[in-house]
Amino acid sequence: MIAHIQHHCLGLLLVTFGLLVVSLTALADVKLSGFGTLGGAISDQDFIYQRFIDNSGTLYRDSVIGVQLDVTHQNGWGLTLQAKAGASTHNDTDWEAVLNWAFLSWRPANDWLLRAGRLRLPLMLHSANSDVGVTFPFARLPTELYSLLPTVDMNGLSVAKTWLTETTEWTLEGYLGKTHADWRYYLRDGLEPLFPSGAMFLAYDFEMIGAVLSRISERHTWRVGIHHTTAAWDVGPTPIRFPFVPLMPGSTLGYYKVSPELPGPPIRYAENYDIYLFTLGTEIRLPQQWQLTIEYGRRHFTEAVVGADTHAGYLSLSKHIGRWTPYCYWAGIRSDNQGLNLAKAMNRNQLPATVPGAALINMTQRAGADLIDPYEQKSLALGTAYHLSRTSSFKLEWLHTRTGALSSFVNAPFGEDSGGRQINVFSLSYSHTF
Amino acid sequence: MPIFLILLFLLVQPAAADLSIIGHATVPLLDQATLQRIYTGKTVALNGVRLTPVNFPPNHPLRTQFLRNYLERDENDYTGYWTVRCYVGKGVPPQELHSVTEVLHFIANTAGAIGYIDDSDLTPEVKVLLKK
């Protein structure tokens, strides 16, 4: 709560300061722009995928609208505010309006850019412009990779230094900041009274620091980043290891203690998750208007054994043909072996009905597997963008996803698994900027 | 016959205007590479002078010619570049002015201002920075 108030106060301060800047000077250039996507998606499955998509169709997954105000002064100072409305990040039912950006910028010289306020992290190639559909050809950015963190917005500082050569632009950007965001989990069976079944959003305080080096030439873009994040759960220490409790000494028959109410040795907790992110991306322009894009992201939890400890990436090939940009991509995500194996072991761990309390314990095992947040899936997408102009485009996509053992992108029905699924998603969207 | 048609085609083509890159008296002379960096937001100051480039609106004939001859881009490419740059929070495109009179007035009265104009509209109040 306090964090929420702090964030709102910061936003208010920036807006006030910005208005002051505008009112004090006649030399400021004010630019108002906007963006929006109306996107529909429907799958061939009756369970929900990527929070919203099932066989009844949804506009929630991809639709977004936003406005941006840029005030720039001739002396190098600037103010940027961006607000958007889209699917809530706190539940799966509402729309909400949020202030994405509210930062002051300063270009003291050609090669320096300093920004302070509410900023967007430069995680992946399109993280900063992920809401602006006309800036990339895909109907939606590959979820496998573009879900490394529950938010890419933070309150903090960013410093960028650029080196220009005759043909190449090198930029090193460092940042430091904090934010408060919800991490979404989906529990098939629930773990009452702490965690009811269904989607739940656990609030975390994130502290972030990182650096990104990019190299841009006429034909190529390369980007590599290293980021460190601590995520502290709002309600207290975070469980990082769930001990296995054998029913008899030496027996493989037993259960993972995922709730403190269950008998057995204590669950191991930490004050926060300690997360390292490594990101690598490239866009390569090939002859005949072909373009190859490859991005990879590693999310590593240093102490916790969780499924969110992942490797993810995608490879895409696209080609500009007049107004059309047909594309295909292959994307994948897989939890690190330790986390995935634990989730699989928990998920299949079922005590025989003859054991007293077996039904309840079995339920906790599936809930535990869901709480570990495991991922194993691959997707293939075929689609095209049709550019009405440089500021508006239609997109059409077929996405085929296969889940491995388990995937937290799938809301598995009660008593069933998220693994072993095949999902076809058809998407149609219209994106515009003005 | 083909030669005749080519000659006819050339004769009926509207004559392209001769553009000059102009600026306030405080702006130093430019080369093309520097001009390209200024209009893509990579260079914001020269010799301690803060620069304020101005453009005509999209699809204005002078802008089309400027983009092609000096920036070596087309309108789609240039607009696309600034759309991305704007929405990653790295700046905004040059201010747009709608008439030659506005451009001349702005440049003559704004330190660091840069623009472009047809040679026939040049006045002594502005400085020619580059001419191809």
Image (cartoon, coloured by chain):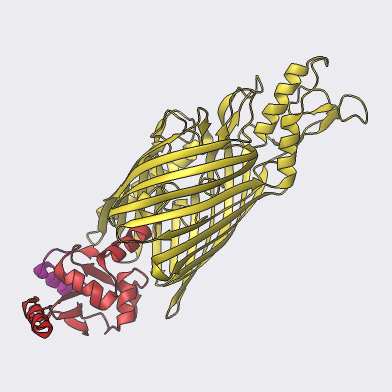
Residue at 57% from the left image edge and 53% from the top image edge: A313
Outermost right residue: A249
Q: Position of residue B87 (x, y in %)?
A: 37, 55
Q: Where A326 falls versus B94 (above or below)?
A: above
The chain assigned the colour yellow in the figure is A
Q: Where A320 falls versus A103 (above or below)?
A: below
Q: Where A386 falls versus A54 (above or below)?
A: below
Is A74 left or right of A138, judged from the image as shown? left
B105 within the magenta span: yes
Residue at 53% from the left image edge and 39% from the top image edge: A181
Outermost front residue: B1
Judge by depth and name the residue closer to the eye, A274 or A6: A274
Q: Magenta part of the protein: which range?
A: B97-111
Is B12 left or right of A104, judged from the image as shown? left
Instruction: Give residue A104's quadrant in the image.
Output: bottom left
- Please tell me the colour of chain B: red
Q: Position of residue A300 (x, y in %)?
A: 67, 50
Decide if residue A75 is in sight here. Answer: yes
B113 within the magenta span: no
Judge by depth and name the residue closer to the eye, A300 or A254: A254
Residue at 58% from the left image edge and 49% from the top image edge: A332
Decide if residue A265 is in sight here. Answer: no
Is B67 left or right of B120, judged from the image as shown? right
Q: Main secondary structure of the magenta part?
A: helix
Judge by depth and name the residue closer to the eye, A394 or A12: A394
Q: Position of residue A295 (x, y in %)?
A: 54, 57
Is A236 left or right of A105, judged from the image as shown? right
Q: Position of residue A229 (x, y in %)?
A: 61, 49
